[in-house]
Amino acid sequence: MNIAVVGLAFTHPYSYTQILHGLGHRVTHVWDDTPARLAEFAERFGVTPVNTPEAIPTEGLDGVLATSSFPDRVNHAIYFLERGLPVYMSKPMAPSLEQLRRLKEAVARSGSPLMGTSVLRYAPAIAALRGHLDSGRLGTLVSARAVSAHDVGMYMKEPNIWQDDPQRGGGTIITMGLHAVEPLVALLGPRIRSVFCRAGRRHYTQSLSEDIAILTLEWEDGLLAVADIPSGVNAELFGVEIYGSKGSVKASMPKGDVQDALGGAVGHVDHFEEFGYVGTMKAFLEMCRTRRMPIPFEESEAIARVVLAARASAASGKLIMMDEF
């Protein structure tokens, strides 16, 4: 398949391009608003650079990766959706309710498939947890916890600071919180009734958003979960714990089945596989082939609304009821 990359605002398009080429597909064209970054990417991967997104030829194109910064990412996604192309948007889908509304309308209007997700949804460890849930061996689910631990120091300076800015990229609650909320929703469903969030600055006190946040989520059936987002830390660890009346399970990324000599989890030797990047691109390619969204838009919309509600809760100090948000 032939894929175009629109925007090089962070590391994901580099990873995705490497994976797509390794799977036997081609990234044919690339656009970015930084000439030096555009030229370096084009030379590294043998891709044709263009001066504007509109200069990317849609004839013979199978799909688009929209990986620019906001609000351009939403504009780019809508542009290609309206030209009948499947679009993948790297996380988050949108850092505002207005941008989320525009995407929803574009999908309905164009009929083109859109995919937006944390790569962790497609991590092998999450698939393994889903198997335990589907088996029913846990009994009645009692509570759950997810952690997204990641050093956000790289977002404290240009050119990455847009991701730390709540007005531009959503800030830590959204960009890192998504990696905790998405696996929980993938495993437990999107019917979240309420969200409460507290956030602060502990290490990166210069942050425009926060470097620590804790979300409390309640599902419509009363299930409670915590999403823990420590981001002023020298660590990269993601995990989910699920507690049931008959059994409890947990999984981490990287997986703990392979460890270093000191006992630290290292997981699969290919971290693109371990953290779900490969699975995400395989799901995207299948969407390009079938034109069916692997994740219902309503579910992706629900996830986006939850992290946006968490942002509003942290600002107001109040519990947010999702049916009123």
Image (spheres, rainbow, N blue to C red):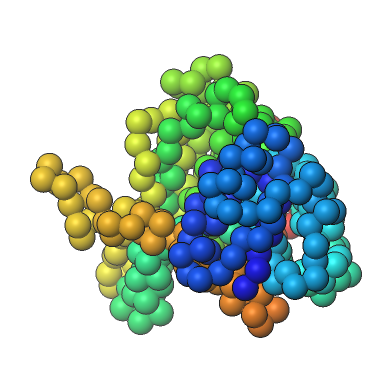
Front-lying residue, 288 or 143? 288
Instruction: Determine whether 5 is above or below 132 in the image.
Output: above
The reply to whether residue 159 is visible in this rendering is yes
Q: Position of residue 310 (x, y in %)?
A: 62, 43
Closer-to-camera residue (7/78): 7
Residue 20 lies, in percent from the top left, at: 53, 64
Q: What's the residue at 62%, 28% (across, down)?
A: 159
Residue, x 62% and y 61% (percent of image)? Answer: 27
State the quadrant of the N terminus.
bottom right
Q: Is residue 284 above or below residue 56?
A: below
Q: In the displayed structure, does residue 111 sit left or right of residue 190?
A: right
Using residue 171 as the reference point, say whether residue 49 is left or right of it. Answer: right
**75 with respect to 6 (left or right):** right
Between 7 and 209, the one nearer to me in the picture: 7
Res 116 seen here: no
Say above or below: 36 vs 270.
Answer: above
